[in-house]
Image (tube, helix red, strand yellow):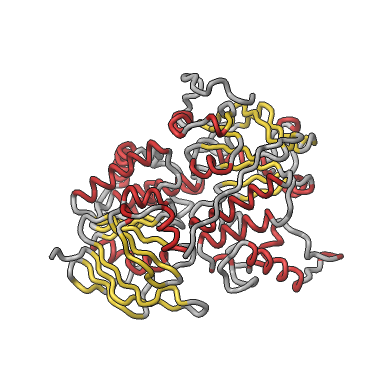
Amino acid sequence: MTTPRLQLANITKRYPAVVANSDISLAVAPGEIHAVLGENGAGKSTLMKIIYGSVKPDEGTVVFDGQTVNLRNPQQARALGISMVFQHFSLFDTLTVAENVWLGLDKSLQLAEVARSITAKASEYGLDIDPSRPVHTLSVGEMQRVEIIRALLTNPKLLILDEPTSVLTPQAVVKLFGVLNKLASEGCSILYISHKLHEIRELCTACTVLRGGKVTGVCNPQNESNESLSRLMIGAEPPPLKHRPVHAGAVALHVDKLSLAREDQFGVDLDGISFEVRAGEVVGIAGVSGNGQKELLYALSGEDARAEPAMVRVFDKQAGRLRPRARRALGLHFVPEERLGRGAVPTLGLAHNLLLTRGNAVGKGGWIRTSALEKQARGIIERFNVKAGGPNAAARSLSGGNLQKFIVGREIDANPKLFIVAQPTWGVDVGAAALIRSEILALRDAGCAVLVVSEELDELFDISDRLHVIAKGRLSPSIDRAAATLPQIGEWMSGLWDNKNNNKEAAHA
């Protein structure tokens, strides 16, 4: 029998409000790509942090290459050959990409050598990034690329990947899978966390399923269906999305030749962007992270109010110079892609985070009616099945997926007339994704105009009525979802809609 690369025995980790891991055992063989599957809050992230040395278990043992190890910190784990790409990134905003990567590597290397290595790895894996860029100028997707490259540069024996494909085009996913299979063939073991069940079935040869912090199943995912994996993970299959024929109404959002110079040297210029979103329809915008999505969303939400007034119209009101509060007064509600820091204040409780965009519980003179605020938060927690320690639980205490459900729920609960959401189901499990998507479609059916900006093509195909693609600050024509194909949208994500007339005359201008 081959000695397992990694063996966990009876791992238990308790926190004051929850048992995150309870008596978990699993084994990963050399060269095996092993999935860890579970709904949000199932204990996956805690378990991975234990393997990586950033969390110490209360009970149980970790055996690596046949030796029992007591991992005190990530530095010790990296020295053994364990690398991890976190879903929530561990990067210093004020440092450059190269400096961040350098921190996790041999300090005998010169920074210039590290920068050259980053460029080479980025090119090899289709994860292009400029080593000289400060991290604070990067989008969420670009930050994830930095984490992946940093991990690959350590030549790991065990690579832990948490949602690694959420920012990649279909073509880049194929390329990454080729890289991962090559790494596995060379003996590198991979622990792969993803909520994309088709990815797990295609890539992985073993799977451990967690539910409520416990192991509830072990299987070969290649012998399973999406439905059977869903049942193992959440105890049921997510309900199918109910699509009704679109009956688009009046124009809710009109963007006309929106051109904005980037505010920082590493941003993207917006170049003549024009599109409409009508009441009762979902319009999706696809694209690889870092192609102008952040700049466009800032201009639409009011965080960037430099546009000419008529370039952005909300219900025929000139809004290009309006700030977020004034746009909310017109009926526009917005969910940013960054959960902590922009979508929620980490140290505040969920109830008080409602005050960022909701004023229902604020009385005369600015007094906060605490009981009403908590009741409102409790309703969102129940409606969106958010796993939290109550309405006063700090935002940072929630898993990424549960915080996403709360933030999306906060804005949907406001009954918006125009709803703009970035990455609505990034990092959430299949059950939560189905819930969020069904709520978005319910908003649409109630007459709300919805704009979804996402790097998840499957998601956009699931919920959009029309699609655009953004590339290098330019926007493609729109195309009906029924007429679009994944290969075509993948090509458009490289900016090729002008060169290849494969949109069969866009369904709408």
State which quadrant residue 445 falls in: top right
Total marks shown come to: 0
From the viewer's perspective, tell me whether residue 151 is left or right of residue 38. Answer: left
| Image quarter in which the N terminus is found | bottom left
Would you place residue 254 above or below residue 430 in this image? above
* Vertical arrangement, residue 499 with respect to residue 159, above or below: above
Residue 434: x and y in percent read 55, 53
Q: Give left or right: position of 328 versus 339.
A: right
Q: Is residue 390 visible?
A: yes
Residue at the image position 58 percent from the left and 46 percent from the top:
422
Residue 479 horizontal/vertical position (percent): 57, 29
Depth order, front residue of 216/413? 216
Query: Which quadrant holds the C terminus?
Result: top right
Q: Residue at x 61, y 55 (%)?
A: 343
Q: Height in image: 91 above or below 141?
A: below
Quick one: which residue is furthest to the right in this view? 364
Query: Which residue is farthest left?
Result: 1
Residue 261 sits in which quadrant?
top right
Q: Residue 446, position in %: x, y?
A: 73, 47
Q: With respect to residue 29, does 152 lie above or below?
A: above
The answer to whether residue 83 is visible is no
Q: Name which residue lies at 60% across and 34% down.
A: 466
